[in-house]
Image: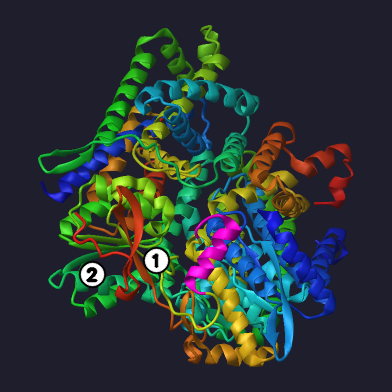
């Protein structure tokens, strides 16, 4: 595939640049703090899409990758004086490797059993970390200020980290796009449609599923490292927040599972909607109700999400927006 | 009496209540292959139901009957709104639909009652049996759980309606051919499962303080208990609950209490991986 | 209640028009889990603002500056805190900062405030460890966690010279664990034997297993706890299970007035408190404890909780530093804070100047309260330190 001649590739580049430059050029910290959350959501949703949308496996506990990435990164920096860059890369690789090993086990389970197992894994890891003293137990890890000074002071460090998070967001979109267009991606789609048939047709299903699972762990782990570095601390409840994990599923469903644009747009819209509901007086108490009702409506009436609906109304869009 | 024995007895009593909650979850799965992610929210609703009945002057144990009736009606309502239209869709859809119901319940609950703790503050006797200190509330909760389970079994095995529920669970198409109205039966089963969840919540509320979020931990315990007993197997779920309670009681004296949850979830994942049909055989 | 503040706010706006205003920015958890505590803190701060503006403002180097407050709701959430402190500094251009409520949120706000070199007075944040991360501009008002229970243990030793076995049982949270860990090493110094040292998870509702361990270990006294909900439940179940303890001291929960709802289970329970309306500190600046309590009651119709006092104290400390410095120049104000050693209605205030723990509170001490029967009703009494007490300690309690 000639990547550079694809308009969708340039669309991803443009969105990424927009995210990076809009706040950076104006030095607008308020905008940056608003956008960083939606960038994180896009990363989570896009990578989750590899499992839900492509492979058809509902990972309810995908947040465990994000949390582990955050913990590994802060631990390496605080206790072993690593720099941020090697720490996040190492955290991403280790998390991905763990997912690979774990994948061979849990991916033998299907449907509801797999979903339950992923919830169990997240809760087991959360409770384990809350008791694991080298990682601060329930207190978590707090970064010493010297970690920011090494990057030219906190002000500069926070900008660097923001730009890196945006980069990871761009890479997540690119990754899901490339997978979708590859032979590997076709194998995943075959598993989603009918796993037994795919196996008969020669798709190495256990390996493919496990690779997808492991791949979907890497960038969220890196993002977790960057995000918690920016926060300056990581505690079990924030790192392994099952609720955020399920919100990520809502984002994928909202935008349209299986599409690159859908997961990104779904995440962006969900963050905007949540922010709006939280700040509207009188509605802030009901944001969960509205989000829940919205999800139910999508499931009942538009299971293809926003993109599914757009494709139906305007079939030619399918060729432009992946 | 040695502390370990007292601890195990405590675990057994609370385990019966876990078992009751787990039966609610596993019954729904067994009959219609739906993992009800609103289970925890419904347990919390049961807690609040008994609380408000108590505040309006009804004794908690008398309130249980009303809670069960509310639960049945609410379950049928949820089934018709959120589950029935997609009952034949992929499992993801029913998972998400029940989860969205959970979000709505917890959202409304948070708005109405905040997330501060509530207490059903009725007089509790402390009994001392041969050196084993136990509150009357805990004994009654365990006893109530056993009675409800016995009642459920009489219904499922001794009444025509109950036999119809089991027939639908075994093979829906065959049951339909025999003239059983499967949609009504599915709604009834969802209602019974919800009523059991609310009952277990009501019993827990007589023991411990609770918030609208308290259902979450009991939902997870219900998952563990049902998986231990084999998803879809009500007897297994009851035993799963008891085993869970016994494990909690037996390990408590020897490890830091905060490790109990880790052990439970690790067992949960291991059972799923190596005995996906549970220790007593489930329905797949 | 809100209308009460229209006047000072208007006055503040007027003073702003003349240019002689100091704007102080912070976030309040008006919603979410810290709602109650944080709003109390806000009330204290607003009372300070009214008090200082009624006197014509803060005299700094011959001029008088009115105080304006600028604040947002952080929803008790970490991600909002960083967003809003950025906004306060870069868009609203506030001069000085007060921390959000809780150590966790304060640590997140500090990352932003430190990058701009803004001075932040931290109230409602009692952690030691966040003050060991290398802050240069953050100053702590509360007694830090490491000294929360030391007074309790001193008191216990004074009441019973022979008591040996104590249990330390704490909630697995940053704050409670830090308190418990410090209490453990202090207990050893005081000649106690810690027979049980264990944490319980947040949101614990069944204390049965922990209570069995306390009994099995043969503990004669218990110190620990965490926050309100768990502490109240713990106290209730200790009572139901008839645990023969000579003293029970819990963090936070018994210091709240709601604790009286527990009835007999509350009787005799001790708690450390940052401040109580009845304390008798001899202040060298600002209002006396009695004057503060009276002002607060006039404004809000009820007794001030210690968080409200902490809010007022944060404002007062900043005011004192500005007056000492004689300028609003941050470097000079920082020097004034470093040099400060005063006693206000809240107690003594002195900050650490050691670079490894800069800003940590060194001067302030806890008072111990106990729930006692007074005229047939449950009431909080100050029982320690002896020179501040309003009643004798009841010991043993069961």
Answer with left or right where residue C221 lies relative to residue C170: left
**On screen, residue A18 above or below B183:** below
Magenta segment main secondary structure? helix
Point out residue A33 in the picture as x, y percentages from the top left corner: 72, 67
How far across and how far down the image is residue A170, in percent? 74, 65
Q: Picture quarter containing residue A130?
A: bottom left
The stretch of residues the image draws in magenta is C288-303
**A36 or A122, which is in the foreground?**
A36
Question: Circle 2 — which element?
Answer: helix
Disc 2 designates what residue? Answer: C156
Q: Callout 1: few (<14), some (14-19), or many (20+) C-alpha neighbours within 10 Å?
A: many
Q: Do the residues labelled 2 and 1 touch (CB within 8 Å)?
A: no
The chain containing the residue under callout 1 comes to C
The disc placed on residue C213 is: none
Q: Which chain carries label 2?
A: C
Q: Residue C176 got which mark?
A: 1
**B227 lies above or below C208:** above
- Picture quadrant of residue A26: bottom right
To the question of a shared chain for discs 2 and 1, the answer is yes
- How packed mark 2 is, by other alpha carbons closer than 10 Å (few <14, some 14-19, many 20 or more), is some
Asked if residue A216 lies in the magenta stretch, the reply is no
Percent x, y of residue B109? 56, 39
Q: Which of C379 and C211 lies nearest the eye of the viewer? A: C379
**Relative vertical location of residue A125 with respect to residue C60 in this rendering, above or below:** above
Q: Which one is nearer the viewer's eye here, A18 or C224?
A: C224
Q: Tell me the residue at 39%/53% (across/down).
A: C230
Q: Residue at x 24, y 42 (%)?
A: B10
Up/down of B110 relative to B284, above or below: below
Give the image's coloring scheme: rainbow
Quote the CA–CA distance across marks 2 and 1.
Answer: 20 Å
């Amino acid at each position: 595939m000639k990547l550079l001649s694809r308009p969708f590739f340039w669309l991803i580049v443009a969105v990424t640049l927009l995210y990076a430059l809009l706040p950076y050029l104006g030095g607008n910290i308020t905008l940056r703090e608003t956008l960083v959350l939606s960038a994180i959501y896009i990363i989570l949703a896009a990578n989750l899409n590899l499992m839900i949308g492509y492979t058809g496996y509902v990972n309810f506990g995908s947040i465990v990758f994000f949390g582990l990435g955050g913990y590994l990164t802060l631990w390496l920096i605080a206790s072993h004086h690593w720099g941020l860059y090697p720490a996040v890369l190492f955290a991403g690789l280790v998390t991905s490797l763990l997912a690979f090993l774990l994948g061979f086990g849990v991916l033998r389970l299907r449907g509801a059993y797999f979903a339950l197992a992923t919830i169990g894994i997240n809760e087991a890891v959360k409770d384990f970390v809350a008791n694991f003293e080298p990682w601060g137990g329930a207190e978590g890890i707090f970064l010493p200020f010297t970690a920011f000074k090494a990057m030219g002071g906190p002000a500069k460090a926070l900008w660097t980290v923001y730009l890196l998070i945006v980069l990871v967001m761009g890479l997540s979109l690119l990754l899901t796009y490339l997978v979708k267009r590859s032979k590997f991606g076709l194998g995943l789609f075959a598993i989603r449609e009918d796993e037994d048939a795919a196996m008969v047709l020669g798709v190495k299903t256990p390996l493919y599923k496990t690779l997808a699972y492991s791949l979907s762990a890497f960038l969220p782990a890196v993002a977790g490292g960057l995000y918690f570095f920016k926060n300056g601390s990581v505690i079990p409840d924030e790192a392994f927040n099952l609720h955020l994990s399920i919100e990520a599923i809502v984002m994928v469903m909202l935008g349209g599972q299986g599409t690159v644009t859908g997961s990104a747009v779904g995440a962006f819209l969900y963050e905007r909607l949540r922010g709006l509901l939280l700040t509207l007086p009188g509605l802030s108490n009901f944001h969960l109700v509205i989000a829940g009702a919205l999800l139910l409506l999508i499931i009942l009436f538009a299971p293809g999400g926003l993109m599914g609906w757009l494709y139906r109304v305007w079939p030619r869009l399918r060729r432009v927006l992946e | 009496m040695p502390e370990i024995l007292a601890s195990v007895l405590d675990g057994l009593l609370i385990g019966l209540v876990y078992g009751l909650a787990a039966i609610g979850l596993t019954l729904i799965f067994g009959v219609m292959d739906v993992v009800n992610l609103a289970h925890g929210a419904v347990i919390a609703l049961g807690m609040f139901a008994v609380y408000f009945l108590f505040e309006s002057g009804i004794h908690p144990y008398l309130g249980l009957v009303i809670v069960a009736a509310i639960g049945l009606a609410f379950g049928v309502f949820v089934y018709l709104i959120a589950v029935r239209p997609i009952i034949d869709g992929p499992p993801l859809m029913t998972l998400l639909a029940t989860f969205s119901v959970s979000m709505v319940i917890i959202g409304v609950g948070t708005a109405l009652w905040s997330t501060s703790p509530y207490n059903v503050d009725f007089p509790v006797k402390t009994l001392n049996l041969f050196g084993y200190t136990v509150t009357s509330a805990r004994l009654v909760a365990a006893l109530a759980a056993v009675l409800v389970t016995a009642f459920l079994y009489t219904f499922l095995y001794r009444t025509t309606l109950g036999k119809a529920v089991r027939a639908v669970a075994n093979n829906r198409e065959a049951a339909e051919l025999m003239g059983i109205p499967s949609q009504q039966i599915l709604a009834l089963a969802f209602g019974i499962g919800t009523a059991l969840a609310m009952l277990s919540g009501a019993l827990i509320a007589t023991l411990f303080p609770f918030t609208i979020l308290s259902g979450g931990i009991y939902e997870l315990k219900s998952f563990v208990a049902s998986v231990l007993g084999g998803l879809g197997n009500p007897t297994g779920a009851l035993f799963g609950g008891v085993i869970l309670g016994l494990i909690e009681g037996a390990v408590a004296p020897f490890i830091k209490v905060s490790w109990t949850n880790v052990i439970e979830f690790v067992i949960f994942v291991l059972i799923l991986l190596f005995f996906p049909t549970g220790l007593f055989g489930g329905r797949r | 209640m809100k209308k009460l503040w229209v006047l000072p706010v208007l006055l503040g706006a007027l003073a702003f028009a003349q240019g002689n205003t100091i704007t102080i920015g912070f976030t309040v958890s008006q919603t979410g889990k810290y709602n109650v505590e944080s709003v109390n803190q806000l009330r204290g701060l607003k009372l300070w603002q009214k008090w200082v503006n009624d006197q014509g403002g803060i005299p700094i180097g011959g001029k008088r500056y009115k105080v304006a407050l600028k604040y947002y709701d952080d929803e008790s959430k970490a991600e909002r805190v960083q967003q809003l402190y950025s906004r306060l500094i870069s868009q609203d251009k506030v001069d000085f900062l007060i921390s959000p409520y809780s150590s966790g949120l304060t640590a997140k706000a500090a990352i932003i405030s430190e990058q701009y070199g803004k001075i932040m007075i931290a109230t409602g944040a009692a952690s030691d460890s966040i003050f060991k991360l290398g802050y240069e501009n953050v100053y702590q008002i509360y007694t830090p966690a490491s000294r929360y229970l030391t007074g309790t243990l001193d008191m216990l030793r004074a009441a019973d010279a022979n008591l040996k076995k104590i249990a330390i049982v704490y909630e697995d949270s940053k704050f409670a664990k830090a308190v418990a860990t410090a209490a453990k090493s202090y207990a050893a110094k005081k000649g106690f034997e810690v027979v049980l040292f264990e944490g319980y998870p947040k949101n614990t509702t069944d204390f049965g297993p922990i209570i069995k361990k306390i009994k099995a270990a043969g503990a004669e006294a218990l110190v620990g706890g965490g926050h309100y909900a768990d502490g109240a439940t713990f106290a209730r179940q200790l009572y139901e299970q008839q645990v023969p303890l000579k003293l029970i001291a819990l963090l936070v929960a018994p210091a709240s007035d709601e604790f009286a709802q527990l009835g007999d289970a509350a009787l005799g329970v001790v708690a450390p408190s940052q401040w109580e309306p009845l304390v008798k500190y001899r202040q060298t600046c600002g209002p006396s404890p009695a004057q503060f309590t009276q002002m607060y009651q006039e404004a809000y119709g009820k007794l001030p909780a210690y968080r409200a006092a902490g809010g007022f104290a944060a404002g007062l400390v900043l005011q004192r530093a500005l007056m000492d410095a004689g300028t609003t120049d941050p470097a000079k104000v920082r020097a004034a804070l470093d040099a400060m050693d005063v006693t206000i209605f809240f107690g003594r205030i002195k900050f650490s100047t050691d670079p490894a723990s800069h800003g940590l509170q060194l001067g302030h001490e806890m008072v111990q309260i106990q729930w006692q029967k007074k005229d047939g009703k449950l009431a909080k009494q100050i029982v320690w330190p002896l020179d501040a007490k309003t009643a004798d300690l009841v010991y043993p309690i069961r």
